[in-house]
Amino acid sequence: MNNRKENNFVREVLYYKDYYLSFFKDLKPEVKRKINWTIQLICTLERIPVRYFKSVSSMHGIFEIRIEVGTDIFRVFCCFDKGNLIILMNGFQKKSQKTPLREIKFAEKIKKQYFEEKEKK
């Protein structure tokens, strides 16, 4: 039997290279727990609440995983590959209302790199 179905997964989440892991490794334990909890929601819920997962309107095909811990706000950019496979890209702590342009550009660069590498295989 498919392991995804045994665990009630409706989608799979992977990370691309070490971009996400570099961000994740230095976070406080409570932030790591909340991010893991949110990713589990994304894996198991058919319809993910916008509070936790949202398309970034200015970026074609890029989504943000939205995490709040107390007054701290974190975002992890990701994209879909083959419908139910979500690729985690870069993450950052949000310190203002607007998402920093450098983070947006970085996510776009990572997405492009991912699909170019995949195409070569």
Image (cartoon, rainbow, N blue to C red):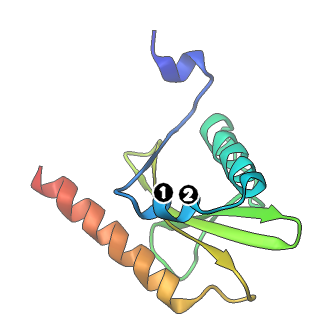
Residue at (29%, 61%) from the top-left corner?
Answer: 114
Residue at the extreme right of the image, as rendered: 70
How crowded pointer 1 is (Cα within 10 Å; few <14, some 14-19, many 20+) is rated as some
- Report whether 106 appears left or right of 67: left
- Report whether 77 appears left or right of 72: left
Residue indicated by mark 2 = 25
- Report whether 36 appears left or right of 68: left
Give x and y (percent) for residue 90: 48, 68
What whole-number distance in Å separates the C-alpha atoms at marks 1 and 2? 6 Å
Residue at (47%, 63%) from the top-left corner?
Answer: 22
Quadrant of the rendered structure where residue 111 is? Answer: bottom left
Residue at the extreme left of the image, as rendered: 120
Amino acid type of the residue that numbered disc 2 sits on in the rendered structure? Lys
How crowded pointer 2 is (Cα within 10 Å; few <14, some 14-19, many 20+) is rated as few
Residue 55, compared with residue 108, is above or below; it is above
Give x and y (percent) for residue 12: 49, 38
Q: Do tag 1 and tag 2 residues touch (Cβ < 8 Å)? A: yes
Give x and y (percent) for residue 24: 57, 59
The quarter of the rendered structure image containing the N terminus is top left
Amino acid type of the residue that numbered disc 1 sits on in the rendered structure? Leu
Quadrant of the rendered structure where residue 74 is? Answer: bottom right
Could you tell me which secondary element the residue under label 2 belongs to? helix
Is residue 52 something one can see in this rendering? yes
Residue indicated by mark 1 = 21
- Report whether 111 appears left or right of 73: left
Quadrant of the rendered structure where residue 89 is? Answer: bottom left
Residue at (58%, 29%) from the top-left corner?
Answer: 9
Which of labels 1 and 2 is toward the front?
2
Residue at (44%, 74%) from the top-left corner?
Answer: 107
Is residue 89 something one can see in this rendering? no
Residue 77, compared with residue 17, is above or below; it is below
